[in-house]
Image (tube, helix red, strand yellow):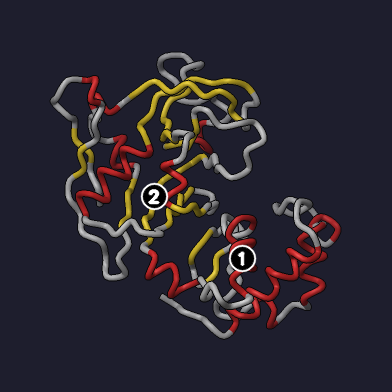
Amino acid sequence: MLLFAACHTPATENKIIPINEKPNENGEVNIVLEKVLNHQAGNAITKVTVAYDPYFKTPKKYLGFSLRQLLEATWKASKFDTANAMVIFECKDGYNPVMDLSKIYGPVNGYIAFKDLDQPEDNDWPDSLSQHFSPYYLVWDQAQKDDQSLFWPYGLTTIRLIPKKEKDRLIVPDSSNPAYSGYLTFKDNCIKCHSINKIGGSFGPEFNLPKNITEYRDEQQIISFAKAPSSYRYNSRMPAITNLSDQEFEKIILYLNYMKDHKYDH
């Protein structure tokens, strides 16, 4: 596990120093965020101003840590290969969005927030949300209101760095394969809630192990269900997928059929 210690240089440097951890046998590095709460992070703590928080639908202020600095300190200390790697954000409720590591280094800065500054001193979160939001909430400072490419997971517990070789081996077709386009659509729209070969979210069912979803459900029924889950299942937790065309759904089905012949139980 990774522990984080206080940096004793001036606070303006705002550094995070991890205790070194080597990648596991698959080349993955896991950051267990609960450990951060149990140790003084010193000058790594910063006040975060968010231009628009999509959950609260208003600007917000938090205390937290820089996601970029946390990941950079981690991959440098562990000698993790960052080329084309991905990041998985694991939450208590099984929501596990996936993001390319390169996205972290875009114009919008991510922060791992642990306190809502609109709350009284002895409260980290509103009473009605404390159970769901603790220990961490991932926020972005200057994200545009309509930016769907950034995830805001709450109840965040672990960050996993997955190297390209492991990601490609488990879930990614070769870029020359027609199924690759379906993988990209699946990654952007489905993998935060559903896993493939145990990579992805656990909020919804796994789609490839032990049986691929196309092995027990008609392909057109899969698409129809995704478009209107509540018409199939009372009180379904899955929201209706309304932003994809029929052609994009067909690309996802092509990818799922490809993965049926590429099962890896790791």
Residue position marked by numbered label 2 in the rendering? 159
What is the three-letter code of the residue carrying label 2? Ile
Answer few, some or many: residues within 10 Å of disc 2's Cα (few below 14, many 20 plus, some between 14 and 19).
some
Q: Is residue 78 left or right of residue 209?
A: left
Question: Around disc 1, counting alpha carbons within 10 Å, would you say few (fewer than 14), some (14 to 19), or many (20 or more)?
Answer: few
At 19% from the left and 35% from the top, the residue drawn is: 5
User: Mark 1 is on which residue type?
Assistant: Pro
Residue drawn at point x = 36 percent, y = 56 percent:
161
In this rendering, would 265 be left or right of 15?
right
N-terminal of the two: label 1 or label 2? 2
Q: Please provide percent x and percent y for residue 6.
A: 19, 30
Task: Kindly state the secondary structure of the residue where label 2 is placed.
Answer: strand
Give the x, y percent position of residue 229.
79, 58
Q: Kindly identify which residue carries mark 1.
A: 205
The one of 265 and 68 positioned closer to us in this rendering: 68
Q: Is residue 95 above or below residue 191?
A: above
